[in-house]
Amino acid sequence: MTDFSRAILSLQPQAQFVIDPDNSLDNLVWHDENIPRPTDQEILDEADRLSITMALSKIRKAKELGGFTMPGGLGIPTDEKTERRIMGAYTKAQVDSNYSIASWTTDGGLTHTALNATAIIAIGDAFDAHIQSCFDAEAAITGNTYASIKLMEAAFDKAYDAAQDGRIARVMRA
């Protein structure tokens, strides 16, 4: 992480920019002499990274709240209300192997399912695995995407240089 990232992400009031009304990078005033002022390219890179991070966070949240299906077809919503209910039942089922729910519904009452302690624990474990998988996927993509941006920039520069070399060669032949 760059010094700029640490400064911005720490949200320390003394480490921030004041941007002139025209929003030009040329008019940024850096407010902390203890942290080196980032270059314009570092500022743009960090903005790209944060934009990608925010987009991936939205994708992860949608997947996280999108639910999952247990083997056998039981759909499990993953909203916070359902999470609280599942984890409450999960805790009871861990303590009491005879604990059961006679009429569990996750589709607004259209279907009812009886759940024993083993099924409740399996749902709780699957719920946790679903949520953790969403965060793990986000972390993996975040790292790969940021690296991909750098690779795309390098590929663009190489393609630009090749295109420019071709144009220069044509101009030189003329």
Image (spheres, helix red, strand yellow):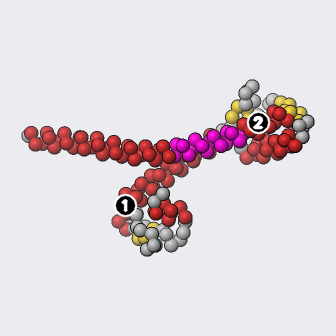
User: With 124 as the anchor, is 14 left or right in this view?
Assistant: left
SS at circle 1: helix
Nearer the observer: mark 2 or 1; the answer is 2
Residue 71 sits in quarter = top right
Query: Do the numbered discs 2 and 1 sit on residues whose CB atoms are within 8 Å?
Result: no
Q: Name the amino acid type tagged 1.
A: Asp
Q: Point out the tag, 2 or 1, that comes first from the N-terminus.
A: 1
Q: Nearer the viewer, residue 148 or 31?
A: 148
Quarter of the image for the C terminus: give it.
top left
Q: Name the amino acid type tagged 2.
A: Ile
User: With 49 as the anchor, is 102 left or right in this view?
Assistant: right
**Compared to 44, does 148 lie above or below?**
above
Report x, y in % for residue 23: 40, 63
Label 1, on which residue? Answer: 40
Label 2, on which residue? Answer: 123
**Does residue 114 belong to the magenta stretch?**
no
Q: Residue at x 47, y 52 (%)?
A: 49
**Compared to 14, does 101 lie above or below?**
above
Residue 111 sits in quarter = top right
Q: Which residues are magenta?
A: 127-142
Q: Nearer the viewer, residue 140 or 62?
A: 140
**Compared to 70, does 6 lie above or below?**
below
